[in-house]
Image (tube, rainbow, N blue to C red):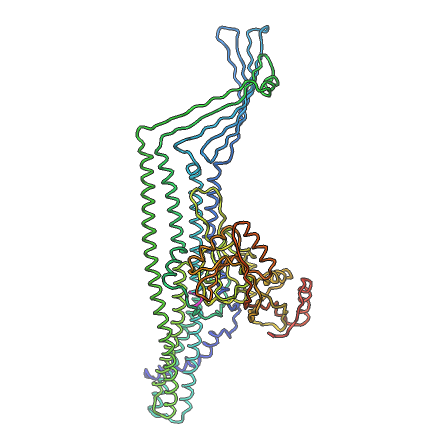
């Protein structure tokens, strides 16, 4: 058997195995691995809820919060109690004394650095020389002592230095946590898009394999068997084997990427993930100057460095005060009662009558001769502050360069989109022409195979260009620091270890140019309040959230959202998977519950869950609805609108920004479906000095169809419908997906 014959036999064997390869790739073999269809928003939601690395980082913030509690313990009052007994005998004399005393005291540190002690002491003193001259005196005293530093160690900053340092460390951990959320979301978006493209490449490989098989069958069906026919068969066989290899490699890449996505979203069970959403082609609307300004204000690494600078400057101020000498005021006063050969009640009567007053006051001055330790500490803190300032300046410079480079990459990605789309069209036309030419005998099989390979290459290039553009946009938003806002993700500060979801804060989230701002905790100098820990509000599923805005801009403040049910447990993770799997409509009977706006959806879903069913949400067409917005003001630029939103800080109002028809920006404090609710909020904010005006608009809001179940029979569906009717729903049972 010569080499050519052996090679032909191998290729024909691979042709025979082709159906089995395709069955494995298509999953048509017996494979019990569950399959879920997953939107990109669902992937982000699951990752934020379940990602192990993110949960570890959340605990870091919880640990930092406990440090604040520890440092605040300096203000815990200290209670002391003692009892003493002593006896004295005079050598050579028949004389002695016995003394018994008990004391009770309470000491408290004040923010000024003062120490206040309140104490009382009482007890008898007995003396004896012989039985005829025994007597017992009783003494009682109650008083207060104050020690107040006046120079060194005086003031709130020095007293609460440890509290402030731990608070700054905690705020830094929040910013680091937010940065970890951004990193996780960025990874999910990137890997999800790549998985989608790999699936498309896999489909392309399948089509190419089928095309090669059809070509081979067509050639084999020809009656001639001359040399040119044998060459054509060889070329077709070679193309078929090559595309089989490419198909197997494409399937391996899909499985590897799916495993990474499962890890990112926290799915422990092996599951086939079918991505629903192609890479987004949404354009960032920020101009380069706007993007740079946002990055300098919103990047969490810059915020963390600025927090570190404030911490260092506080240490510098305190260490400068430590260069001063010690000067302290001490004062004490109170009442004493003394009863010669008396009792305890006699002494308390004297104190209650106001007799036996005493007081004392004095100044303590201490000047060290040589203060090298304090001077070196001050110099170190001063240099550290200068170093941080320069580091911030360098980081801001790098951020500007990074944003400019991202813009250049976006321009290149846009050009690649245009170029690859044109190349694909030309490649398709070329294949069609070669197919015609081969039928009339002016083109060979090899020419057609080469043209088809070029078409596959062009399609792959276009897919990669689409993915690359989405990647560049996500990287741009990540580098600007607004990736979470652009993905409708909110970070709150309530519980570091609770990663949970919230609905959109406004009743009109689907209106054009709606902006969803993000939490920015305030940063002060001397801290005495313990801020809350980070909570991440995940984006709702694709069918539960508003359509993405076509003109998104950025704000700097957000109100805390109402936490929904956490999904960290295995039970809830399975429920999420069941919800997504239920969207495929695999059953015969479905319970149609009704259509809802986004603000009404959460309550309805909760009732469905209480009935023991899994709610399934499908986005429907938008409907016009009247909305009352609370207008803060109209502004010419985004920065001014952002500043206006800062007036809502601490009010728990749900602010957002819209781009107006004149090219400016309108800042709003919220939106409501009823005029009554809007006026209640307007009155509440007016009491805080914030003047708002009502603006009535009609907006197109997305509606959502709420269904439940996919049941095999009408009886089962009816039994479950009764559960929902008891929750107040009017249920319609429909067969199939209708």
Quarter of the image that includes the C terminus = bottom right
Q: Does 698 sit left or right of 429 as displayed?
A: right
Q: Does 399 sit left or right of 564 as displayed?
A: left
**Image point 38% across, 40% down: which residue?**
315
Image vertical order of residue 661 relative to residue 689, above or below: below
**Residue 199 can be seen, yes or no:** yes
Quarter assignment of residue 158: top left
Image vertical order of residue 428 relative to residue 326, above or below: below
Image vertical order of residue 671 relative to residue 10, above or below: above
Principal secondary structure, stretch drawn in magenta: helix
Q: Give percent across and percent down for residue 3.
A: 32, 82
Q: Give percent across and percent down for residue 526.
A: 43, 42
Q: Give percent across and percent down for residue 90.
A: 49, 9
**Image point 33% across, 66% down: which residue?**
408
In the rendered image, residue 90 lying in the magenta stretch gets the answer: no
Q: Nearer the viewer, residue 309 or 251?
A: 309
**Residue 194 can be seen, yes or no:** no
Quarter of the image that includes the N terminus = bottom left
Quarter assignment of residue 335: top right
Q: Give percent across and percent down for residue 325.
A: 36, 30
In the rendered image, residue 192 lying in the magenta stretch gets the answer: yes
Q: Which residues are magenta?
A: 190-194
Q: Nearer the viewer, residue 16 or 730?
A: 730
Q: Nearer the viewer, residue 186 or 146?
A: 146
């Amino acid at each position: 058997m010569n080499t050519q014959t052996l090679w032909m036999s191998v290729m024909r064997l691979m042709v025979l195995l082709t159906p089995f390869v395709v069955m494995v790739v298509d999953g048509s073999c017996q494979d019990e691995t569950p399959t879920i269809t997953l939107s990109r928003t669902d992937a982000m939601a699951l990752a934020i809820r379940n990602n192990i690395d993110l949960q570890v980082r959340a605990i870091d913030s919880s640990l930092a919060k406990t440090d604040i509690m520890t440092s605040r313990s300096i203000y815990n009052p200290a209670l002391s109690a003692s009892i003493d007994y002593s006896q004295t005998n005079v050598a050579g004399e028949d004389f002695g004394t016995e003394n018994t005393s008990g004391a009770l005291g309470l000491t408290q540190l004040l923010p000024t650095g003062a120490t206040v002690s309140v104490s009382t002491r009482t007890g008898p003193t007995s003396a004896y020389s012989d039985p005829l001259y025994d007597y017992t005196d009783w003494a009682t005293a109650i008083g207060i002592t104050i020690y107040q530093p006046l120079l060194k160690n005086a003031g709130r900053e020095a007293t609460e230095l440890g509290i402030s340092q731990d608070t700054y460390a905690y705020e830094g951990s929040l910013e680091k946590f937010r940065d970890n959320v951004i990193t996780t979301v960025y990874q999910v978006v990137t890997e999800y898009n790549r998985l989608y493209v790999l699936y498309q490449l896999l489909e392309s490989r399948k089509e190419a394999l089928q095309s090669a098989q059809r070509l081979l069958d067509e050639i084999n069906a020809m009656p001639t068997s001359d040399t040119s026919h044998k060459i054509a068969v060889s070329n077709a066989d070679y193309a078929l084997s090559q595309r089989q290899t490419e198909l197997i490699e494409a399937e391996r890449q899909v499985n590897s990427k799916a495993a990474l996505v499962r890890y990112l979203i926290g799915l422990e069970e092996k599951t086939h993930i079918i991505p629903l959403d192609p890479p987004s082609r949404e354009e960032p609307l920020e101009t380069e100057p706007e993007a740079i300004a946002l990055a300098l204000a919103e990047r969490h690494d810059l915020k963390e460095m600025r927090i570190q600078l404030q911490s260092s400057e506080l240490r510098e101020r305190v260490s400068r005060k430590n260069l001063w000498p010690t000067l302290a005021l001490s004062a004490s006063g109170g009442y004493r009662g003394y009863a010669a050969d008396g009792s305890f009640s006699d002494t308390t009567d004297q104190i209650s009558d106001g007799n036996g007053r005493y007081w004392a006051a004095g100044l303590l001055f201490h000047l060290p001769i040589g203060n090298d330790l304090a001077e070196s500490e001050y110099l170190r803190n001063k240099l550290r502050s200068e170093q941080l300032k320069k580091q911030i300046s360098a980081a801001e410079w790098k951020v500007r360069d990074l944003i400019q480079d991202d813009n250049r990459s976006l321009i290149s990605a846009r050009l690649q989109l245009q170029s690859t789309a044109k190349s694909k069209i030309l490649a398709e036309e070329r294949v069609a022409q070669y197919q015609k030419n081969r039928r009339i005998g002016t083109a060979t099989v090899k020419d057609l195979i080469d043209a088809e390979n070029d078409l596959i290459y062009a399609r792959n290039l276009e897919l990669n260009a689409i993915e690359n553009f989405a990647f560049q946009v996500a990287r741009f938003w990540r580098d600007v620091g607004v990736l979470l806002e652009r993905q409708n993700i909110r970070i709150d500060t309530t519980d570091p270890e609770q990663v949970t979801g919230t609905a959109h804060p406004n009743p009109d989230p689907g209106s054009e140019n709606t902006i969803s701002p993000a939490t920015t905790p305030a940063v002060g100098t001397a801290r005495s309040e313990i801020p809350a820990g980070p909570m991440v509000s995940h984006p709702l599923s694709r069918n539960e959230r508003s359509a993405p805005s076509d003109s998104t801009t950025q704000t700097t403040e957000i109100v805390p959202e109402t936490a929904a049910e956490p999904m960290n447990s295995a039970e809830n993770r399975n429920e999420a998977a069941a919800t997504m799997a239920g969207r495929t409509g695999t059953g015969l009977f479905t319970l149609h519950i009704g259509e809802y706006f986004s603000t009404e959806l959460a309550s309805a879903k909760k009732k469905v869950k209480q009935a023991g069913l899994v709610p399934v949400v499908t986005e429907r067409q938008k409907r016009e609805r009247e909305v009352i917005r609370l207008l803060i003001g109209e502004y010419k630029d985004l920065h001014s609108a952002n500043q206006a939103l800062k007036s809502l800080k601490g009010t728990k109002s749900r602010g957002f920004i819209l781009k107006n028809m004149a090219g400016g920006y309108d800042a709003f404090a919220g939106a409501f479906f009823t005029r009554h609710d809007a006026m209640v909020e307007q009155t509440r904010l007016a009491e805080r000095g914030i003047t708002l005006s009502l603006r009535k608009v009609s907006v197109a809001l997305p509606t959502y169809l709420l269904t439940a179940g996919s049941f095999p029979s009408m009886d089962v569906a009816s039994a479950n419908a009764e559960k929902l009717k008891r929750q107040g729903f009017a249920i319609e049972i429909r067969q199939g997906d209708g």
